[in-house]
Image (cartoon, grey):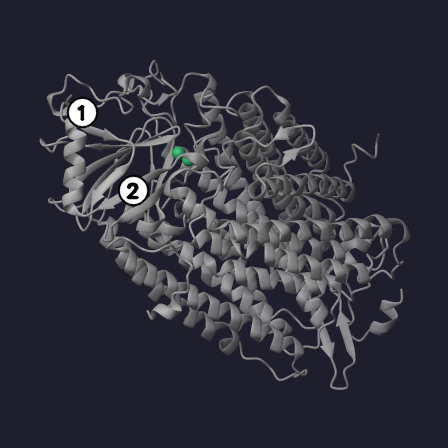
Amino acid sequence: MTHLFSTDHRTIGRQYLTLALIAVITGTLLSLLMRTHLVWPSWKLPLHGSILPEDYLSLVTLHGTIMLFFVLTTAPQSGFGNLILPSQIGAQHMAFPRLNAFSFWLTALAFAVLLSSPFVYEGAAISGWTAYPPLSAIPSAGPGQGLGMDLWLASIAIFSIASTINSINTLVTIIRLRCKGMTWDRLPLTVWGWFTAALLSVLAFSVLLAALLLLFCDRHAGTAFFIPPGDQVSGVIHAAGHPGNGSPLLWLHLFWFFGHPEVYIAILPGMGLTSMVLANFSRRPVVAYRLMIATTLAIGVLGILLWGHHMFVAGLNPFASTAFSITTLVIALPASAKVLSWIATIWRSRPHYTTAMLFSLGFVSLFITGGLSGPILAQPILDEYLHNTFFVVAHFHLIMAMAGVFSLFAATYYWFPLISRGRLLSERLGRWHFWLTLYGAYNTFFPMHFTGLAGEPRHYAQLTQIPNAAGHLLAATLPLNLHITTSAFILAASQLIFLVNLVRSFRHGEATPANPWQATTLEWYPCFNLPTEPLMAHRPPCQYIVTASGDESFLPQWIEDASVDIKSIKRE
Amino acid sequence: MHPALSIALLPTDASAHGRALDQHLLLNLWIIAALATLAHLILLIGLFAKRNATPRHLWAIEYLPLALLATLFATLGIRAERLWAATRYTGASHEAMQVEATGLQFAWYFRYPGPDATFGITRPQLADASTGNPVGIDPTDPHSTDDIVASELVLPVNREVDLALRAQDVIHGFAVPELRLKQNAIPGETIHIHFTPTAPGTYAILCTQLCGLGHYRMSANLRVLPPEDFQAWLKKKQEAAHQ
Ligand SMILES: [Cu+2]
Ligand SMILES: [Cu+2]
């Protein structure tokens, strides 16, 4: 019991990661159901029967909500953040350990509330993870808009509170608990990622929480923040008795003010980790370290200034679209600066191809491929064609979902000895896992660009048996969709290798010396328990020396004297 | 752009502004395909080329490529904004044909103002598809008597259309891929878009904003007709409405 409700940040980190693992398995299975239904619409789900349109939409909604909140936000920010961040800055614990445990249990509660929603009468919410009103504001607007929608709102509201608490904890920890010598420009880039993501979280989740409360009031308290006068749903005029003069556009502004920073919250820690892992296994310092800090912060600042690019065709003033188009194109520059630094860091370096390194290289590849369609979607005239098509689905699955997941895999392979107290994941299984995942990721999500260009819209429960010219247009995408579905199964099946690797390695994994990767940051201080004496940072991270004869040595942040024999540290 | 370069990605284009949009889109696609290939090539060369410890100059690997990318994105952005401004900054011309599209769960209805060229007033409380008045036209308004409501959008070729977009219940997305058109219909607002169909044919009107369980089947046909056929269709519709 004491262990379950532990206030130890490493235990809480493991609890968050366990939650994220359960979430990612759930979310993946839901996506497989969607993909199966899309290409074999008559297939019957055992114990359930045919997948009805409302079932499909609740799958979409649950999949998006679970993956975004409980995987891509929870795992990097709360999971690895708790597990690694304190030791990486030389702290013994998080700033507020009890609050930390509280925010984990709130997150778990949020997940439980969300998972209960498919089992209520009228089913889980079907409005997508963006929950646009008035559909989501009027309980009688169709299936999924009743109690299921309330549970969705409650779940995300609880999650927002948990995430805000966790982010405040992270910020205070980084600001107050850095060890001696850990100056801001010696902070590992992962810490900069967590720091910026936490800043964004505090800003963005508070706005989301406010929006959720307003929506809840619209549903149950007779307000009309998002419902215009005279709105008529299935013959009933809503907000008739309310003096309100609301607009759904208000929700879009509030939601995307949260929603866009959210994707950076998900990816910034991964960007930081990629820099560190690439430097580590290339035995090189990160190229342009200070510029990487600057671009992380720049992405954070710009990240809250471009929510309007989700609204080019939503009824926003076209002049405003131009302004949001510019801020969106501008953010491509710090993102490109990061890619350039990654390439420069590994450039002609004779890298060590560990699984963590492979997944970081995969991250760079997916980040490039998925990221480059960002500037396309940033142009309103092109968004006019591509908005809400599978082109957008391809874009964000490659850059956010897949790159995000690749950084999580890199983190898992890299930090596994710190999770398992001294065991390594199998590198042989890791390599199989990496290559199959890379193959699956590209084959699943890259062809979506083409079905999108061909006109396939998102959120369509069916592509066949559709009347009118629309049926003809959509039928053209079926062969590619079959390929996408098959690849999705390969992608999902490859993850079984990872699960086997995880389970096996926890007990039987190769025991490793304290710093197997020759890492330079403080979490690798050579002892698996927290160091008893206070640590001190003596230099920036990623200090490596490679002599002309090819001898490599490294200078960890914790070593005071640069003349210390590096090899003796390795064997400790 | 050379037609051979415009690989069969997009549905055929049937609108006046679509050609420029397609060219700009394909230009963008080719540029990002080239950039992605280049970046991956550099990545692979960097991984496999022999080790070299020569010092790297920050301006050559960071600032110079960044400046080039900034120029590239600025150029593409300006080009795109000119096209966007041309279609969206100003409204339709005075000669444009007036049509109204209303989205409701899960159908599109289209209204023509009739000979008086003015739409009658609509009232939400009157909207009822079962009485044949799905968009809620107020029959006491004299402008409404000649209004025509159809469940397909029929337009004459080569005439500019001023489309007033409305939604009755929830947000819907009015999209005609073959006319390179997309605009959400927002309840409580009337949003105008304008365009000119340039090729006769039958095209798909989709709903591209998640609007409930029938979202996927909320489609309609757009029929673009030669002007004389369109006049004949309109006349038939008017006669049917006044019997
Ligand atoms: Cu619709
Ligand atoms: Cu719809």
Residue lying at the far left of the rendered structure? B116
Determine the image quadrant of residue A453.
bottom left
Q: Is mark 1 within 8 Å of ligand 1?
A: no
The correct choice, above or below, for B43 with respect to A533 in the image is below
Residue lying at the far top of the rendered structure? A241
Give the position of the C terminus of chain A as an image quadrant: bottom right
Question: Does residue A151 appear left or right of residue A306 in this picture?
Answer: right
Q: Which mark is residue B207?
A: none
- First along the sequence among labels 2 and 1: 2
Question: Does residue B135 appear left or right of residue A375 in this picture?
Answer: left
Q: How far from the left and from the top, in percent, is residue A32?
A: 64, 43
Give A415 or B132, whichever is nearer the viewer: B132
Q: How far from the left and from the top, in percent, is residue A135?
A: 44, 28
Q: How far from the left and from the top, in percent, is residue A260?
A: 48, 46
| Residue A540 in sight here | no
Q: Which residue is mark 2?
A: B222
Under circle 1, the secondary element is helix
Give A484 or A23, whichever is nearer the viewer: A484
Q: Which mark is residue B241?
A: 1
2 and 1 marks on the same chain:
yes
Give the position of the N terminus of chain A as an image quadrant: top right
Q: Image quadrant of ligand 2?
A: top left
Give A556 or A357, whichever is nearer the viewer: A357
Determine the image quadrant of residue A12.
top right
